[in-house]
Image (spheres, helix red, strand yellow):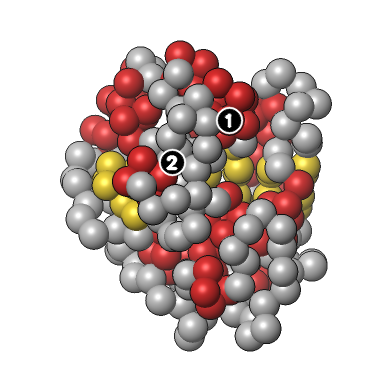
Amino acid sequence: MQNKVILISIDGMRPDGFLRCGNPFAEELMKKASYTLDAQTVFPSVTLPCHMSMFHSVPPERHGVTTNVYMPPVHPVNGLAEQVKNAGKTSAIFYGWEPIRNLSQPSSMRFAQYMHSYAEEETDAILTDAAVTCAEKYAPDFVFLYMVETDEKGGHDNGWMSDEYLRRISLALDNVKRVYERCGKDYQIIVTADHGGHERSHGTRMPEDMTIPMFFLGKTFEGGRVLQEVSILDIAPTAAALLGIPRAPEWEGKALV
């Protein structure tokens, strides 16, 4: 299997928030993608540990990052970006929260763009446009787009399931739709959250924090199929399988293709 992959992470998006945000693309996404509204993230359900597990397919007790402060692992595990590079392919990353840069080792990414999430009102949209332009112009094999405004400006500033939180999810889905419309013919697209949230926080084992939606969109996936027993650890193996590259031997998740 030789595909190109775009992975989109919408920080803090709860499944019920996805369903209640009112964006018509939410229903379209469930019709076109194989998906689950009941995937599980890792504990602690915090942004950097969850994304490290997303990229490295091991839980925090193995990669060693248990807070939003990066700590180099004692026993390093190759992540998705390293596997892409070792296979002779190229990666790109677009992100609005600076610690996300620690998901890959130096020089693993061919293209990278960072913009602080409070630098512009719609940073996620600006980064989405940059990611789409990069995909169209340079065609990297793997593109990672990270959207933070749902978590920061939605959940933490206003509360999970608040009107502003739901509005931020809808804006994020507008960005996903734009990626799909412009890149869907050339890329398989994975859309996920890293964790959920409750009140104005997250990080616990509560279902509101641990349960996340995932969508797998493209020619490889059956539209409308509901996936069972999916974990955030499954994302890296699935992306690697789509790309036609080896998975790292330490990875614990399963490929969903």
Residue 189 shows in the view: no
Q: Which residue is mark 2?
A: 196
In depth, the one of 212 and 244 nearer the eye is 212
Q: Is residue 257 left or right of residue 224?
A: right
Q: Which mark is residue 216?
A: none
Residue 9, position in %: x, y? 52, 44
Residue 8, position in %: x, y? 52, 44
Image vertical order of residue 103 relative to residue 165, above or below = below
Residue 2, position in %: x, y? 45, 64
Kindly report which numbered mark, 2 or 1, lies closer to the viewer in this rendering.
1
Crowding around mark 2 (Cα neighbors within 10 Å: few <14, some 14 to 19, many 20+) is: many
Residue at horizontal 50%, vertical 43%?
A: 202
Crowding around mark 1 (Cα neighbors within 10 Å: few <14, some 14 to 19, many 20+) is: some
Q: Secondary structure at mark 2?
A: loop
Q: Is residue 151 left or right of residue 208?
A: right
Q: Amino acid at mark 1?
A: His
Could you give the CA–CA distance between mark 2 and mark 1, rounded to whole angstroms?
11 Å
Residue at horizontal 57%, vertical 59%?
A: 49
Instruction: Choose the circle earlier in sequence order: 2 or 1.
Output: 1
Residue 112 shows in the view: yes
Q: Amino acid at mark 2?
A: Gly
Q: Which residue is mark 1?
A: 156
